[in-house]
Amino acid sequence: MLLVLAAMASAAKAQSLPPLSLKQAEEIALRHRPLLQARQFVAQSAEQTTRQLEALRYPQLAGTATIATATREDTTIDGKRVALDTRIASGGLNNPTVLRRDAFGVLASQLITDFGRTARLIESARLNEASLSASVAATEEQVLLDVNAAYFAVLETQSVLRVAQKTVDARRVLRDRVAALAKGKLKSELDVRFAEVALSESQLLLLKAQNAVESAYARFSAALGYSNTQHYTLIDPALPGPPSGDLHSAIKTAMSERPDLISLKADQQAASKFAQAQKALRYPTISALAAAGAVPVGDARFPNNYGAIGLNMSVPLFDGGKITALQREAQLRALAAEQNVSEAENNVAKSVREAWLAVGAAWQNISITNQLLEVARQAAVLAQTRYDLGLTSMVELNQAQLSAVDAEIGAARAEYDYLLARAALDFQVGVLNRRAP
């Protein structure tokens, strides 16, 4: 009763939602998966990092205001005691001997040159931004593969459920028939018991199939980005033929199209640019400085306005080896990133080869399982005929029927295994997001 009610509830939910194709499921996942949205936010944050570095190229302007009071009065000018206070310009406190004042104004600075350090930092930031954008694309590919796997899992478990339901119906009819013959003394009570055992086995298969369907729907809903289970009516996709081209072309495409590989290459280039920027720490930095403002409150001997402009050059002379260590660290990280790219390329080639072989095996498995299904069905028909004629036992009939059921389940699974293998190959090549619907 509980199983029937659960199946009815699932059917009602499925009827309440429109049919869903694989392409539509992929579009839903790309809009709703929190994992993908998180990666997109991280990639967008990298754009702000680039803007922060680009801002160093433009003038920096700050408004300042200073009210300076005496720290102590121990200086005499023209017979009057004055304070040890700050300079006239606003924006900071130091301790020369000047008069007390209140001032406000602006401070401006403009980087003239740092011999390419800022430019290389910006290039490195842009490459990091490109790396994160490629990682978003890699996440999209992973999300699509999850959707494909979950989509085919639902269809596969549903096909197994149909086989299990048909098996239960057929074995219930056989049990009733054998029981009727046993009442007429045409079959033995042992045959009835074997028929009941076969019916119970088919019911267990049905129970497992129903649970597998619900689990597959839960996984599919999570792949779409939903927290609750969505019972869509899924549309069975057409079965494509074997992949065109050859293995060498697939590997070559993967080397240029895999987004995770593109991300690693961008990381390596960013690390190289950063190493160059660290090397530029040894060079001077030249900046233009300007200050202007007013002194509304102060000694009458000072003008009400002030202004100044000049150049500032900073040259590192001795830092205890810090710049050398920073440069060496950046160079080593760049070398490590280069080796990571080489390792990733080797793994990509291996993964494409394995996926290519899996597609070929899955395609051949379809024809083999179909042949096995045809033979198993013929054997089951012959076993049923021989049992009706009294030439074989119920055990042999049950074994023949069980083989037919296994063959039918295997044939159904073979098609979805092939579809999943094709999706996995597209993922390994890096074109899952660009394949034809």
Image (cartoon, rainbow, N blue to C red):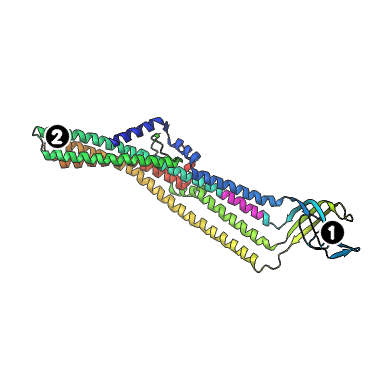
Residue 416, given in percent of the width and then of the height, sits at 36, 41
Residue drawn at x 80%, y 53% is: 291
Q: Is residue 124 left or right of residue 289?
A: left
Q: Is residue 381 left or right of residue 352?
A: left
Q: Which mark is residue 99?
A: 1
> Is residue 245 something one can see in this rendering?
no
Q: Please tell me how many numbered marks the rendered image carries.
A: 2
Q: In the image, what residue type sits under mark 1?
A: Leu
The magenta span reads 119-131
Q: Position of residue 153 (x, y in %)?
A: 37, 41
Identified at 55% across, 53% down, the residue is 265
Instruction: Say which element carries label 2.
Output: helix
Image location of residue 234, percent across then percent down: 39, 35
Does the magenta-highlighted stretch encompass residue 423?
no
Question: Label 2 sits on what residue type?
Answer: Ala
Q: Quadrant of residue 100?
A: bottom right
Which residue is disc 2 drawn over? Answer: 179
Label 1 element class:
loop
